[in-house]
Image (cartoon, rainbow, N blue to C red):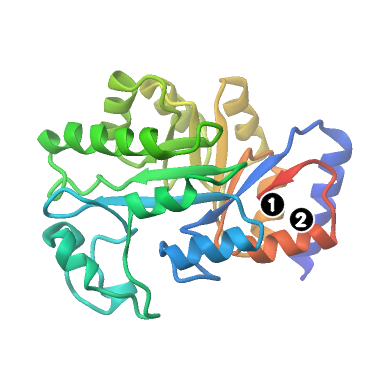
């Protein structure tokens, strides 16, 4: 409680001292601590609750379908010790999560999004496992996800392609220069991460919230980068990220955060 109050006071002081345009709160995997993550039910429920900004993950099935899944293994979410990339789309469609929801495919998610207004989505390219995504597989994967999203996402939607994998980001930058790109890292916001992002030509960085600080977030802004701080599993995480000047906050509890800000209006715009 003491830490929470300290962060709240710092946030109040910051909003009175610095001009801030606002921040976008993303439902991480649809809101993984509130929902059955990365399922259509999760996105539907979150949208119904007023959440219009999301982060999600894309993997490739054995026969080339794009499936929405964070882990390569289905053990944690479905109780089945099988690898997404080793199964066909037909096999994957027979599997359900532990909560009884079918696995979600990118086509189906895009169909759900197609008539939505005020949408923002971060599509993470999960290609960092080089044994599953060797160098010669990156181009086909990147071209496919870009084409599918571009063809179906609403024209007024704000969306980006994100990844830990520099290979995927470099390919998208070279071959699809209109795509907004974000480098994800498990490191705090820092000068080396900013330098890495600049070399890749990305517009945004998603950095580890712990150990990040306001000075380095400002440095990123001064270098023309927007900053996403993650993970946000608790209210105090979100308040801390706002104090540091984050443009995006990837939260596991977007519905709870929305309710909090409805009851405690912030001093600058916060969009869900």
Report helix, strand or loop for mark 2: helix
Disc marking residue 162:
none
Q: How many marks?
A: 2
- The structure residue drawn at horizontal position 46% and vertical position 53%, both measured from the top left corner, is 112
Report helix, strand or loop for mark 1: helix
Give the residue at mark 2: 7
Q: Residue furthest front?
A: 115
How packed mark 1 is, by other alpha carbons closer than 10 Å (few <14, some 14-19, many 20 or more), is: many
- The structure residue drawn at horizontal position 34% and vertical position 58%, both measured from the top left corner, is 70
- Quarter holding residue 163: top left
Indicate the position of residue 65 as horizontal and vertical percent values. 21, 50
Give the residue at mark 1: 240
Q: Residue furthest right?
A: 16
Q: Is residue 197 above or below residue 252?
A: above
For the N terminus, which image quadrant? Answer: bottom right
Labels 1 and 2: the sequence-earlier one: 2
Viewed as shown, does residue 69 lie left or right of 138? right
Indicate the position of residue 80 as horizontal and vertical percent values. 22, 77
Q: Is residue 76 above or below residue 243?
A: below
Viewed as shown, does residue 260 lie left or right of 74? right
- The structure residue drawn at horizontal position 80% and vertical position 56%, both measured from the top left corner, is 8
Foreground residue among 195 and 252:
252
Viewed as shown, does residue 239 lie left or right of 192? right
- The structure residue drawn at horizontal position 65% and vertical position 29%, both measured from the top left corner, is 218
How packed mark 2 is, by other alpha carbons closer than 10 Å (few <14, some 14-19, many 20 or more), is: many
Pointer 1 with pointer 2, Cβ within 8 A = yes
Q: Is residue 35 above or below residue 191?
A: below
Indicate the position of residue 214 as horizontal and vertical percent values. 67, 38
C-alpha span from label 1 to label 2: 6 Å
Indicate the position of residue 79 as horizontal and vertical percent values. 27, 79
């Amino acid at each position: 409680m003491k830490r929470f109050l300290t962060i709240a006071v710092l946030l109040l002081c910051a909003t009175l001292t610095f001009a801030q345009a606002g921040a976008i709160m993303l439902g991480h995997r649809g809101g993984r601590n509130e929902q059955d993550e990365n399922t259509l039910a999760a996105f539907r429920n979150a949208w119904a609750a007023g959440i219009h900004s999301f982060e999600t993950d894309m993997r490739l099935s054995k026969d080339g379908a794009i499936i929405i899944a964070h882990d390569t293994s289905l053990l944690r979410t479905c109780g089945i010790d099988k690898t997404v990339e080793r199964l066909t789309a037909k096999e994957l469609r027979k599997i359900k999560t532990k909560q009884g929801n079918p696995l979600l495919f990118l086509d189906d998610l895009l169909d759900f999004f197609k008539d939505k207004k005020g949408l923002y989505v971060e599509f993470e390219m999960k290609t960092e496992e080089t044994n599953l995504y060797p160098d010669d597989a990156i181009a086909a994967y990147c071209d496919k996800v870009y084409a599918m999203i571009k063809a179906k996402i609403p024209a007024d939607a704000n969306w980006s392609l994100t990844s830990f994998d520099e290979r995927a980001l470099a390919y998208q930058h070279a071959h699809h220069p209109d795509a907004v790109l974000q480098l994800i890292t498990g490191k705090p916001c820092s000068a080396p991460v900013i330098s890495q992002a600049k070399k890749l030509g990305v517009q945004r960085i998603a950095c580890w919230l712990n150990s990040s600080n306001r000075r380095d977030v400002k440095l990123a802004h001064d270098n023309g980068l927007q900053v996403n701080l993650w993970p946000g599993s608790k209210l105090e995480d979100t308040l801390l990220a706002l104090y540091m000047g984050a443009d995006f906050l990837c939260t596991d509890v977007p519905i709870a955060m929305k309710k909090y800000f409805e009851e405690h209006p912030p001093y600058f715009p916060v969009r869900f």
